[in-house]
Amino acid sequence: MCYSTLLYTIAAGKGKMNRVREPACNFGCPIEAALDVIGGKWKAPILYHLQQDLKRFNELGRLMPGITQRMLTKQLRELEADQIIHRKVYAEVPPRVEYSITEFGLTLSPLLKEIQVWGNEYLDRVIKIRSQG
């Protein structure tokens, strides 16, 4: 359940104060909230690579050859906005930017590990099914 904000409203025409709870977020459940942070094709792979060590933008792009620069930028910005990763810009010419996972982002490690385990099991199953047919 989302955290809520308590609002006070004046009942129409009666001058009474009513307490009303209004959702502080637009998520229907915690799973929806979690998937908003790590969902999509690229966020989990980005986080997987950042768990190993900090990475520069182009290094991340090389580790995920199917991602465009525009999509990588978008995904990194979203993860940074959610405080899952940290972006450090060095005042150099040419500019150097490094990305690292935050302490809060590291709390996703067990989840990412379980997704990896499930993915390996799924791949084994798909390979077995396709080799039989």
Image (cartoon, grey):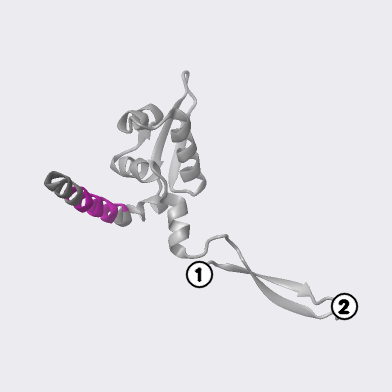
**Most prominent secondary structure in the magenta stretch?**
helix
What span is colored magenta in the figure? 112-124
Residue 105: percent from left, percent from top: 39, 50
Residue occupying the point 14% across, 49% down: 128
The amino acid type, in three-letter code, at marker 1 is Met
Q: Is the residue 44 above or below the residue 111 in the image? A: above
- Is 122 in the magenta? yes
Q: Is the residue 89 above or below the residue 10 in the image? A: above
Quadrant of the rendered image containing residue 12: bottom right
Quadrant of the rendered image containing residue 8: bottom right
Query: Which element is circle 1 on?
Result: loop
The amino acid type, in three-letter code, at marker 2 is Gly
Q: Is the residue 127 above or below the residue 17 in the image? A: above
CB contact under 8 Å: marks 2 and 1: no
Residue 124: percent from left, percent from top: 17, 49
Residue that label 2 marks: 13
Residue occupying the point 57% across, 61% down: 25
What's the mark number on residue 1? 1
